[in-house]
Image: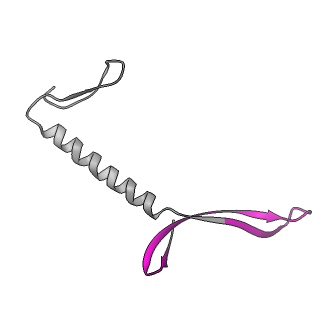
Amino acid sequence: PLFTKHFERKIQILMSATPRRGPDGQIIGMIGVGQDITDLRAAKETADRTADELARLIDSANAPIFGVDLNGMVTEWNRKA
């Protein structure tokens, strides 16, 4: 990502570009687009942090804890299970 200052706030921009070619195949320019991914990155970091905290809590619990999917299959468990 590209970091830039915008209205006194640091934002992250994901850049994509492709060459623009003329009739003879020579590169004559570039076409590019940028997307502000600041909020997306912040949300992902928050979700990752929460998942890590929950995993540590479950692993350190003194009781068996397990997760079951919609088919009744056990998909997650801690060390006490």
Residue 9 position (above or below residue 39): below
Q: Judge whether residue 27 is colored magenta.
A: yes
Q: Is 25 located above or below residue 73 in the figure?
A: below
Q: Point out residue 39 in the picture as x, y percentages from the top left corner.
A: 43, 61
- 65 magenta-colored: no
Q: Residue furthest front?
A: 7
Question: Up-down: is 20 above or below 59?
Answer: below
Locate residue 65, reporting x and y percent.
17, 29
Q: Which residues make up the magenta segment? A: 4-32
What residue is rendered at 32% in x and 55% in y?
A: 46
Q: Which residue is at 36% across, 22% downward? A: 70
Residue visible at 91% across and 62% down in the picture:
23
Residue extending furthest toward the top: 72
Query: Which residue is located at x 49 percent, y 78 percent?
Result: 6
**Residue 14 at x, y = what percent?**
55, 63
Residue 40 shown left or right of residue 59 in the figure: right
